[in-house]
Amino acid sequence: MSVLSPQMVASLEENTSRSEELFTDFHRHPELSMLEERTRKIVADQLREYGYDVQEIGGGVVGVLSNGDGRTVLFRADMDGLPVTEASGLDYASTATQTDADGAEQPTMHACGHDFHITAGLGAAKLLAEHREGWPGTYVALFQPGEEKAAGARSMVADGLVDKVPTPDVCLGQHVLTTPVAGKVAVASGPVLSTAASARIVVHGAGSHGSMPHLGVDPVVLASAIVTRLQTLVSREISPSDFGVVTVGSLQAGSSANIIPDSATMLLNFRAYSEEILEQLIDGVERIVRAEREAARSPKEPEIELYDRYPLTTNDSGAAEVVRQGFLEQFGEDRVEEMSPATASEDFSIVPDAFGSPYCYWGCGAYAEGRETYPNHSPLWSPDLQPTLRTGTEAAATAVLAHLAQEG
């Protein structure tokens, strides 16, 4: 017995061409984080057409469909693209550019699958609206901006999300991933995505001629010592049984071979499966930077700025079990896998945490078995349109219906 009724399954088939049309349009017209104006309008118009009460909140869109007494279930989809030049070779590849928040013209691509998320979210919303006889309660379809900058969920919460829509009994979300294979889903209890943060660190020196290094303080040497020392945070300060990563993704200083510059700038990224480990790594970096600064005789205090802070995504065991059982009924055991924790990060959990609601976040496969795969954020990212889109839509509807059917 499947979660979706035969009538719902028939509607999924009937809506296939429209869903593919929406998807290719979203893919051709990606928009950068917190600049998703066109996307937001299309989503809002579609939800109104389906019969939802629609609000635009904090750059996002929320549609509410009330269908009598029962539970309230929220499903979230993110909408933003990335500043990436697409090289997928797809017939519907993006050639779009967009001016970012700093005024720079950027190539723009849906390089992380958010076009799938939007379309699957709209497909599930349409399915539930067309078949109200199959469920009681209230469905909240939330489309969020700015996930790639960890800004969108906070923006919606700051704009009064919690006071403007019904409080959900559970919040749900999904992401297309390189594993499992296309057509399959993966879910698990506990941590599934890491917590993360980034840092911008500026260390200062004293400029000098390259032939007279003794008359200056070299920030390149200082920054290099910091980078080398940072490796010990994970290898010598974190237990081998715990997970943590510190990456120096950028180190920039100077512009000439014979000039010692007066500063160096580093961009760091942190990942962990617990907030405690993340804080330990951040504290360790600050300690090392200040100690190396003193050892190098740097004339000024370092500048340390944290940004793009992502929470840990850790699924509620009860919420995840309902989703798992729904998937098993709908897809069968051969299409449902255990989701392994990934080191990517999400701001999804900010929404349920604001409501005080449990949540479940799962993965959908993007590439057919045997096909060469390219990771999320790659310019070559090119998931198989089908069965990825159909599975994502079916998974969203299945999880929502499974939770709406719960008592209490």
Image (cartoon, rainbow, N blue to C red):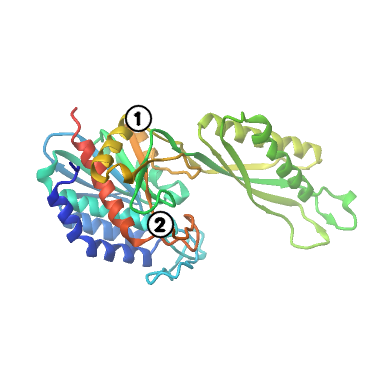
As displayed, is residue 226 above or below residue 119? above
Distance (Cα) linking label 2 and label 1: 28 Å
Asked which secondary structure carries label 2, the reply is loop
Q: Position of residue 367 (x, y in %)?
A: 40, 57
The residue nearer to you, when weighing 321 against 66, is 321
Q: Residue at x 63, y 41 (%)?
A: 304
**Dots 2, 1 in contact, CB < 8 A:** no
Q: Amino acid at mark 2?
A: Tyr
Tell me which corner region of the image, top left, top right, bottom left or bottom right, holds residue 36: bottom left
Q: Which residue is mark 1?
A: 317
As displayed, is residue 351 above or below residue 382? above
The residue nearer to you, when weighing 408 against 285, is 408
Query: Which circle marks residue 110 in the picture?
Result: none
Q: Position of residue 354 (x, y in %)?
A: 35, 35
Q: Which residue is mark 2?
A: 367
Relative to 243, 389 lies left or right = left
Q: Counting residues from the N terminus, which is met first, the one under dot 2 or under dot 1?
A: 1
Tell me which corner region of the image, top left, top right, bottom left or bottom right, holds residue 113: bottom left
Q: Amino acid at mark 1?
A: Ser
